[in-house]
Image: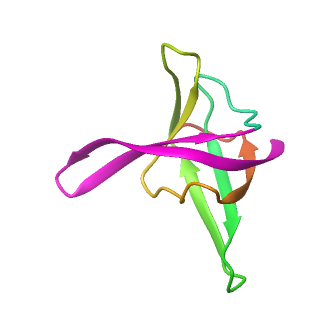
Amino acid sequence: MREFAGVVTDIRLESRSGGVARWQMAVSGSAFAAGDVGELEAVAPSGARLVVQVLEMLVDAEGEVWHVVEKPLAAGTAVTGRVGGEKI
């Protein structure tokens, strides 16, 4: 697995169907590329670990890399990313 540190810079809703939402998150310093999966981990002010599975990666027309997740983190959240694992 490759690790990196970054910050969530933007989030947007990708889709909502049957009560399940999928979100796209942009993360500065990301080591993810199209086709990668893995996870993003943040630490809440309470000290609790928040781990979000990255389901897939997308690159938009402007070249921005978007991490597709079911539970987004707020813009400005510091994360540790881990690239690797198997596609869900």
> Residue at 61% across / 45% down in the picture?
9
> Residue at 20% across / 58% down in the picture?
19
Up-down relation of residue 69 to residue 58 (above or below): below
Q: Which residue is outermost to the left?
A: 18
> Residue at 64% across / 44% down in the picture?
38
The x and y percentages for residue 55 are 50, 41
Where, by quadrant of the figure, is residue 57 drawn?
top right
> Residue at 70% across / 50% down in the picture?
7
- Magenta portion: prevailing SS class: strand
User: Which residues fall within the magenta stretch?
Assistant: 1-28
Q: Is residue 82 left or right of residue 40?
A: right
Up-down relation of residue 7 to residue 49 (above or below): above
What is the number of callouts on the image?
Answer: 0
Q: Is residue 44 left or right of residue 53?
A: right
The x and y percentages for residue 40 are 66, 53
Q: Which residue is outermost to the bottom?
A: 46
Q: Is residue 53 magenta?
A: no
Q: Is residue 16 magenta?
A: yes
Nearer to us in this view, 34 or 12: 12
The x and y percentages for residue 6 are 76, 47
**Looking at the figure, which quarter contains the N terminus?**
top right
Where, by quadrant of the figure, is residue 37 drawn?
top right
Where, by quadrant of the figure, is residue 54 drawn?
top right
